[in-house]
Amino acid sequence: MEFASLTEKAETGQRFTRLFGTEKSCTWMLHFKPGDHTDMHFHAEPETFLVVEGKASVKDINGGERIIEQGEVVFFPAKDYYQITNVGTGRLLLYGNRPEPFGGVHVTAK
């Protein structure tokens, strides 16, 4: 059994923090400053994010957009392009997981 304090991990301010990983799964936390964003991309496996703190814009490859906030969860099927942007005035903390080891496929839109 393993434990992690998201509160403690968030205080480091690191953009990407590995929490737990096996050969079949990975769990991490992302920390975005206002305006920070990911590239438009997808992964080969499904992915889930929980908004721990803040407000984010989630865009798809066709320009669709949805705002998510603290306590909301977003699920991306495998090979579903997306981009996440911190649209709030404070930090954005996301808790994410995928059923693959760290270092899995990351495909960026052209």
Image (cartoon, rainbow, N blue to C red):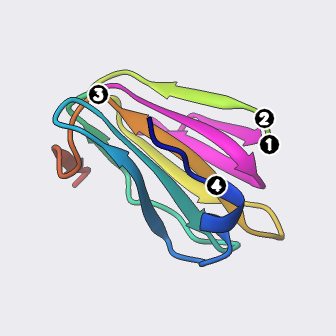
Q: Is residue 69 above or below residue 98?
A: below
Asked if the residue at tag 3 contacts the one at tag 1, i.e. Cβ–Cβ closer than 8 Å, the answer is no
Q: Which residue is label 4 attached to?
A: 5
Q: Position of residue 94 (x, y in %)?
A: 60, 50
**Of labels 1 and 4, the one closer to you:** 4
Q: Which residue is label 1 attached to?
A: 70
Asked if the residue at tag 4 contacts the one at tag 3, i.e. Cβ–Cβ closer than 8 Å, the answer is no
Q: Which residues are magenta?
A: 46-69
Element under disc 2? loop
| Label 2 environment density (alpha carbons within 10 Å; few <14, some 14–19, many ≥20) | few
- 3D distance between C-alphas at marks 1 and 4: 17 Å
> Which quarter of the image is occupied by the N terminus?
top left
- 3D distance between C-alphas at marks 3 and 2: 22 Å
Asked if the residue at tag 2 contacts the one at tag 1, i.e. Cβ–Cβ closer than 8 Å, the answer is yes
**Does label 1 or label 3 sit earlier along the sequence?**
1
Q: Is residue 40 left or right of residue 9?
A: left
Q: Which residue is label 3 attached to?
A: 99
Q: Which residue is label 2 attached to?
A: 71
Q: Position of residue 108 (x, y in %)?
A: 24, 53
**Of labels 3 and 4, the one closer to you:** 4
**Does label 2 or label 4 sit earlier along the sequence?**
4
